[in-house]
Image (spheres, rainbow, N blue to C red):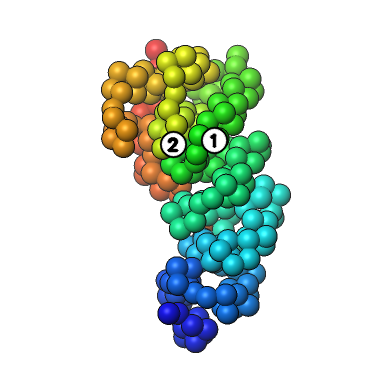
């Protein structure tokens, strides 16, 4: 079982994150003071996720505060978005899901995209309605501005692109682990798409209709974005190039 001495012995951020991962799985409540110290120093995303998983078991309130939309993540060196992809496999419950759903109501495309992706992979049936509502809100914001979306697709890479947000919301709805769309809901999602690539994505999934658990290979399913400001640019550029090619007349 990991101990306080293991934390002190960890010399690098990577080894500390690995140690915190063991603490999250096996650590007792006796380690709570040390975990609080580590998470308060604004650690890396991996380390924060492990510490959050531990706190959600032993002291949920401060962990949940860090997952709320209003938590300030602008300080230098800290994880710039909640580390959903690292946290969700370790700990997922109704309170964590509620925090992710709350992020769907935000204004930042990147934060909303991260929350949507996580809800598609880990969310319950409760996530479907908020995801549909957020896609409808996105449509209201951009309907009649399709030329702007086309210009964004063809322009420089941006993690805050509304085109990426459209893609993440639609993929979360189409790939939901715990829910599926009716034919009417699928048609509604397609109707809310404002880019040609989005409509093609929905059509491809509708034709394939794989069994639950089967993945559909599609150019609009990018690798998850990193949380430390260093995205997998090659994958995103490939995605944007593909989208631009599909939307040319």
| Residue 148 position (above or below residue 235) | above
Q: CA distance from mark 2 to mark 1?
A: 9 Å
> Residue 213 is drawn in which quadrant?
top left
Q: What x and y, as percent, mark residue 196? A: 43, 18
Is residue 133 in view from this perspective? yes
The residue at the point 36 percent across, 28 percent down is 242
Q: Are marks 2 and 1 in contact (CB under 8 Å)?
A: yes
Q: Nearer the viewer, residue 241 or 52?
A: 52
Placement of the N terminus among the 4 image quadrants: bottom left
Mark nearer the N terminus (2 vs 1): 1
Return the residue at label 1: 127
Residue that badge 2 annotates: 178
Which residue occupies the foreground of this view, 100 or 83?
100
x 63%, y 66%: residue: 59
Which residue is rendered at x = 32% and y = 33% of the image?
212
Q: Which mark, by number, is residue 23?
A: none
Rendered residue at 56%/63% (across/down): 57
Q: Of helix, strand and loop, which one carries label 2?
A: loop
Q: Is residue 61 left or right of residue 167?
A: right
Residue 11 percent coordinates (x, y) = 46, 81
The location of residue 152, given as percent across then percent down, is: 52, 29
Residue 185 location (% of width, % of height) = 48, 18
Secondary element under disc 1, as helix, strand or loop, is: helix
Q: Describe residue 205's horizontal placement relative to residue 190 as left or right.
A: left
Label 1 packing within 10 angstroms: few (<14), some (14-19), many (20+)? many
Image quadrant in which the C terminus is located: top left
Describe residue 89's horizontal placement relative to residue 152 as left or right.
left
Residue 111 seen = no
């Amino acid at each position: 079982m990991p101990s306080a001495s293991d934390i002190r012995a960890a010399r690098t951020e990577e080894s500390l994150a690995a140690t915190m991962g063991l603490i999250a799985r096996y650590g007792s409540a006796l380690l709570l003071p040390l975990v609080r110290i580590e998470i308060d120093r604004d650690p890396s995303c991996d380390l924060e996720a492990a510490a959050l998983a531990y706190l959600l078991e032993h002291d949920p309130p401060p962990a949940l505060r860090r997952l709320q939309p209003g938590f300030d993540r602008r300080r230098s060196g800290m994880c710039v978005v909640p580390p959903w992809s690292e946290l969700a496999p370790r700990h997922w419950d109704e309170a964590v899901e509620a925090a992710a759903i709350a992020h769907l109501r935000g204004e930042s495309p990147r934060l909303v995209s991260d929350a949507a992706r996580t809800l598609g992979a880990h969310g319950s049936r409760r996530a479907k309605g908020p995801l549909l509502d957020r896609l409808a809100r996105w449509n209201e914001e951009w309907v009649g501005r399709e030329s702007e979306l086309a210009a964004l697709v063809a322009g420089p890479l941006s993690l805050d692109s509304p085109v990426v947000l459209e893609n993440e919301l639609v993929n979360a709805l189409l790939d939901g682990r715990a829910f599926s769309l009716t034919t009417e809901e699928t048609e509604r999602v397609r109707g809310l798409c404002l880019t040609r690539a989005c409509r093609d994505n929905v059509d491809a999934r509708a034709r394939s209709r794989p069994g639950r658990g089967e993945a559909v290979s599609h150019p609009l399913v990018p690798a998850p974005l990193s949380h430390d400001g260093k995205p997998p640019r090659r994958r995103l550029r490939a995605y944007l190039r593909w989208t631009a090619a599909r939307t040319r007349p």
